[in-house]
Image (cartoon, rainbow, N blue to C red):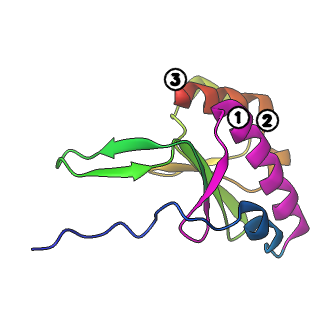
């Protein structure tokens, strides 16, 4: 039986072109700011993963089943009316200070950057990369 191929892989697509294609001015501005924050914190250049995720850095993820896959360290995706932030540890003390957000199973959701404390977000990103 063939192994299932991961659909979300790093691509050569332009992060800048992707962000500029977003319909909302607020989404574009927040996306460029998130790129800056995540690039500074990770020291890695942004890269497109699949068609709609911007990731920074690389790491090998290993599931309990033993399956391994190449993935980004931290990243985000502008989704319908909110941003999904990936790779952030769910640090309860920092999340309590973050501002308006929702925690999903594998990501945090924020509607816009003005709803959260960007310094706390920087701390979350840095703590997730340690």
**Which quadrant of the rendered structure holds the N terminus?**
bottom left
- In terms of image quadrants, where is residue 121? top right
The Cα–Cα distance between marks 1 and 2, rounded to whole angstroms, is 5 Å
- Asked whether residue 86 is drawn in magenta, I would say no
For disc 3, the marked residue is: 130
From the viewer's perspective, tell me whether residue 53 is left or right of residue 30: left
Mark number for residue 121? 1
Nearer-the-camera pick, 32 or 45 = 45
- Residue 53 at x, y percent in the picture: 60, 61
The Cα–Cα distance between marks 3 and 1, rounded to whole angstroms, is 15 Å
Above-or-below relation of 80 to 123: below
Q: Please tell me which of labels 3 and 1 falls first in the chain.
A: 1
Label 3 neighbour load within 10 Å: few <14, some 14-19, many 20+: few
- Residue 16 at x, y percent in the picture: 78, 62
The Cα–Cα distance between marks 2 and 3, rounded to whole angstroms, is 19 Å
- Residue 119 at x, y percent in the picture: 78, 28
Mark number for residue 118? 2
Circles 2, 3 touching at the beta carbon (< 8 Å): no
Instruction: Specify the principal SS of the magenta part.
Output: helix
Point 54% across, 31% down: residue: 128
- In terms of image quadrants, where is residue 6? bottom left
- In terms of image quadrants, where is residue 60? top left
- Asked whether residue 50 is drawn in magenta, I would say yes
Circles 1, 2 touching at the beta carbon (< 8 Å): yes
């Amino acid at each position: 039986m063939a192994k299932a191929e991961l659909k979300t892989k790093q691509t050569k697509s332009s992060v800048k072109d992707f962000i500029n294609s977003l319909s909302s001015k607020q989404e574009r501005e927040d996306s460029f700011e998130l790129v800056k924050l995540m690039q500074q914190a990770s020291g890695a250049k942004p890269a497109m993963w699949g068609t709609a995720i911007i990731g920074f850095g690389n790491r090998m993820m290993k599931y309990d089943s033993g399956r391994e896959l190449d993935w980004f360290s931290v990243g985000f995706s502008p989704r319908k009316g909110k941003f999904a932030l990936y790779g952030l540890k769910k640090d309860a003390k920092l999340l309590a200070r973050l501002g308006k957000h929702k925690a999903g199973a594998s990501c945090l959701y924020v509607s816009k950057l003005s709803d959260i404390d960007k310094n706390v977000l920087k701390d979350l990103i840095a703590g997730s990369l340690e």
